Image (cartoon, coloured by chain):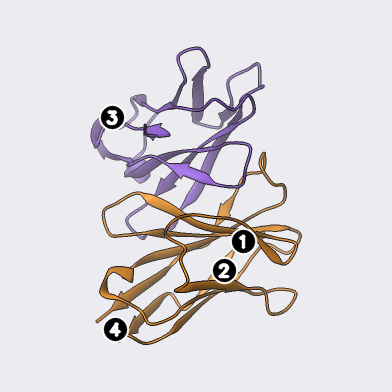
């Protein structure tokens, strides 16, 4: 069964460094998403991406964040100048359809900022 | 106002019994979707069940069913015949007309042998 994959599973970085989190969505899906979950808290929407551009983003997704689909399979989240409060689990998701489509989540990347 | 409210931070259920996890939502959109996800201790998010706002019948997927009461804006998850492997966090989520998902704070379910 097709699944969303994410790498790395755990990323440790120093405060102020840049990180890139990688995702490979399900191949026939057209909509891509990033979410984060701070430990013990609920999942928060960051951004949605369709047709090579951001379709929606939350207040959390400020200039520190950017997304890219560098090729036909990868979908990346870049966090510039990481802060301690960026430590969280980051989930990528994809869906075949937009508003009515089920989103399938990847296993997540645990980001730890020291 | 919260888009998704899950009022049960923790629930316990005896193995083989049924359990209902509550979820209420708030939207003025005529078209929306409601989802339940399971998050085991390993951290991944597993899709369980989907209910569309125009669906006439309650969604069912194996041991999972969604008790959709549109007028009350509730979308409770019912797990029948609980198994030890059902112990996890359960999140209710909603998508409105746009592409943004709103998640509840989750319910931690513990199945007791």
Write the residue at 60% across / 31% down.
B32
Label 1 sits on a secondary structure element that is loop
Label 4–label 3 contact, CB within 8 A? no
Structural crowding at the residue carrying mark 3, measured as other residues with C-alpha within 10 Å and reported as few (<14), some (14–19) or many (≥20): some
* Vertical side of A20 occupied by B89: above or below: above
- Chain holding disc 2: A
Q: Supply the letter of whichever chain is purple.
A: B
Label 3 and label 1: CA atoms lie apart by 31 Å
Cα distance between the residues tagged 1 and 2: 6 Å
- Give the mark toward the camera: 4 or 3: 4
Gap in Å between the C-alphas at discs 3 and 2?
Answer: 32 Å
Residue annotated with mark 1: A3
Query: Judging from the image, what secondary structure is the residue with disc 3 in?
Result: loop
Give the colour in which the image draws chain A: orange
Looking at the image, which is closer to me, B28 or B103? B28
Disc 4 sits on a residue from what chain? A
Residue, disc 2 = A5
Res B51 quadrant in image: top right
Neighbour tally class for label 4: few under 14, some 14-19, many 20 plus, Cα within 10 Å: some
Which is in the foreground here, disc 3 or disc 1?
3
From the image, tell me which residue sits under label 3: B7
Q: Position of residue B41 (x, y in %)?
A: 32, 56
Q: Are marks 2 and 4 on the same chain?
A: yes
The N terminus of chain A is located in which quarter?
bottom right
B67 relative position to A14: left or right:
right
Instruction: Say above or below: B11 vs A15.
Output: above
Quickly name the residue at label 4: A15
């Amino acid at each position: 069964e097709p699944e969303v994959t994410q790498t790395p599973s755990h990323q440790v970085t120093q405060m102020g460094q840049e990180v890139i989190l990688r995702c490979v969505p399900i191949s026939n899906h057209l909509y891509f998403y990033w979410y984060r979950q701070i430990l013990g808290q609920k999942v928060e929407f960051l951004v949605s991406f369709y047709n090579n551009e951001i379709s929606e983003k939350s207040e959390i997704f400020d200039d520190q964040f950017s997304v890219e689909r560098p090729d036909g399979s990868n979908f990346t989240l870049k966090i510039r100048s990481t802060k301690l409060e960026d430590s969280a689990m980051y989930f990528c998701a994809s869906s075949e359809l937009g508003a009515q489509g089920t989103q399938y989540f990847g296993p997540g990347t645990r980001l730890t900022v020291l | 106002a919260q888009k998704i409210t899950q009022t049960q931070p923790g629930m316990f259920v005896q193995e083989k019994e049924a359990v209902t996890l509550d979820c209420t939502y708030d939207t003025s959109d005529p078209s929306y979707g409601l989802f339940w996800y399971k998050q085991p201790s390993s951290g991944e998010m597993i899709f369980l069940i989907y209910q569309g706002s125009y669906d006439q019948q309650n969604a069912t997927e194996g041991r999972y069913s969604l008790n959709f009461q549109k007028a009350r804006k509730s979308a409770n998850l019912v797990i029948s015949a609980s198994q030890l492997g059902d112990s996890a966090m359960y999140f209710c989520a909603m998508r409105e007309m746009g592409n943004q998902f709103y998640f509840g704070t989750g319910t931690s379910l513990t199945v007791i042998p």
